[in-house]
Image (spheres, rainbow, N blue to C red):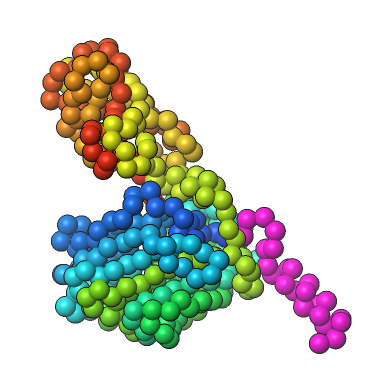
Amino acid sequence: MTKAAELAKMGEVLTNSQIGGRRNIVINGAMQVAQRGSVTFDHAATGTANLYGLDRFQFQSAALDQLEGTITQVADAPVGFTNSLKWTTTEPESAIAANETFDCCQKIEAQDLQQLAFGTSSAKKLTLRFYVKSSVTGTYGINIFKADSTARQLTSTYAISSANTWEEKTITIPADTDSSGTIANDNGEGLRITWHLGTGSDFTSANNALTWTDYANAGWAFGHAQNNVALTDNATWQLTGVQLEVGEQATPFEHRSFGEELLLCQRYHYRAGKAESAFTNFGQGWAVSATAASIQVPLPVEMRSEPSVSTNDVQISDDVNAAIDCTVVNVNVATGTRQLAVLEASVASGATQYRSYALRGSNNTASHVSLSAEL
């Protein structure tokens, strides 16, 4: 290559790639943050499952009959990384019927995607790169889905060539210049990256390989051909080093500090208190009656929307009298904000009106208060 051609090529790379500032649009791509710890997927318990394991990565399913498994953060990763997300099948599906689906995805907030200029003639291409490892070789499907207004999608595939071996995959995603490709500038879902693990024939017949089209079920998983992760006992599938960036050039993975990555995750999910510790304090407040207390829980970052709450084995305590077990804890949307959650903790009886109370865990390291504003 002549010097002139080399300089021209360099100019093209600079024009089409984002080489400065934050490049990785994906959150927790190095699988550093796992606020929920290990979780168990059970089709019978969750129905059409939408279960988060490691932060920002959600396992979805529809119409399954038997599938169960675990989602864990493991210290097994390619060079340059420490952790990966690991799915392990503990009870396989007997067969994948035409209407059944099972996948892993990350949903990306719409207002974080305005630089893509989708829906205009200036729309930009994207590059997706990730590392994957599985006990099952074969061809797997990827879907890129746009949720806003007119739903749009395209598909691609990647091949796992060697069992139980880390492999790097790179996919270039074309720009969506169609006017229906516009991504709203709001806090809703903008794009979704989906890694298919089990998909029935209802979702694989329409060819939209690397071509943006309006959403249709038949094109959801075109090209996906390997369902045995869901069909094989003890089958595994692992993922790490996920990076989505503007441009056609895959650049080195953007490593962020753990603290920065944690804050990015906590916009969508916040697990209050000290992890795996009994009698952890989650918030402070006062009794509004003998059977209820109003508790304030400061949030480390503004959440995407007013959160919902889930708890396990929590109490209210005034640090003098015996703690009182909570029966129900709900979010008070009227008085809470995206920076401060106000919880209404119900007890059977025994609270003293206007007395100060803390909301805390019991003598149980699994006690928790979790606030969620996931997409």
Toward the viewer: 166 or 290?
Answer: 166
Q: Is residue 309 visible?
A: no
**From which residue to which does the magenta span run?**
1-23
Residue at left offset 28%, top offset 35%: 278
**Left or right for 232, reference 30:** left
The front one of 333 and 163 is 163
Dominant SS in magenta: helix
Q: Which residue is at a point 50% across and 44% down the rendered structure image?
A: 263
Place residue 234 in its image quadrant: bottom left
Left or right of 194? Residue 102 is: left
* Residue 138 seen in the current view: yes
Asked whether 172 or 280 is in front, the reply is 280
Q: Is residue 346 left or right of residue 195?
A: left
Up the image or down, 309 lies above or below 56; here it is above
Q: Residue at x 61, y 72 (%)?
A: 250
List x then y, in percent, for residue 108: 47, 57
The image quarter containing residue 38 is bottom left
* Residue 45 located within the stretch drawn in magenta: no
Q: What residue is shown at x 27% (from left), y 12% (from top)?
A: 354
Looking at the image, residue 113 lies above or below residue 103: above
The x, y position of residue 83, in whole percent, is 45, 62
The quarter of the image holding the N terminus is bottom right
In the image, is residue 154 above or below residue 254? Answer: below
How many marks are shown on the rendered structure? Answer: 0
Q: Position of residue 21 (x, y in %)?
A: 67, 55
